[in-house]
Amino acid sequence: SLKEYNCWYKFLDLLVLLIPKEISYVLSWRVEAEDKMRALGKGAMSHNEITEYVKKFIPAYETYLPHLVDNPPVKTVLRCLLNKNRLP
């Protein structure tokens, strides 16, 4: 439950929601980030490790994101729907 975050909302003047048009974009964004890290010679997860890692969080996106979009915890909200290239 996200109720534990309720105490923090009073400190927010504005909530910015960056919303992927498709939840599957989250995986491709993580793959892209890991590929960039690998290209720089930094430690990075394999594509299989990324998939397994991101799959753990997809249910949270599917569960909490629609409620957050429809019932934001603050009055002022900037919603930005992102395409696969992270553009509105």
Image (tube, grey):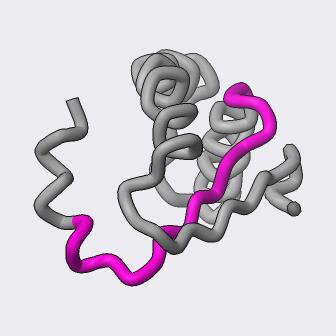
Residue 81 visible, this orientation: yes
Would you identify the image quadrant in which residue 57 lies?
top left
Q: Is residue 87 left or right of residue 26?
A: right
Residue 29, position as x, y percentages in the image = 69, 45
The residue nearer to you, when weighing 66 against 42, is 66
Would you identify the image quadrant in which residue 88 lies?
bottom right
Q: Residue at x 46, y 77 (%)?
A: 14
Residue 35, position as x, y percentages in the image = 69, 47
The residue nearer to you, when weighing 47 against 73, is 73
Quadrant housing the N terminus:
top left
Q: Is residue 14 above or below residue 83?
A: below
Task: Tell me where the magenta segment starts and ends, as one range.
Answer: 9-24
The residue nearer to you, when weighing 57 against 50, is 57
Q: Is residue 57 left or right of residue 46?
A: left
Q: Residue at x 51, y 30 (%)?
A: 61
The total of numbered circles placed on residues is: 0
Q: Is residue 19 left or right of residue 8?
A: right
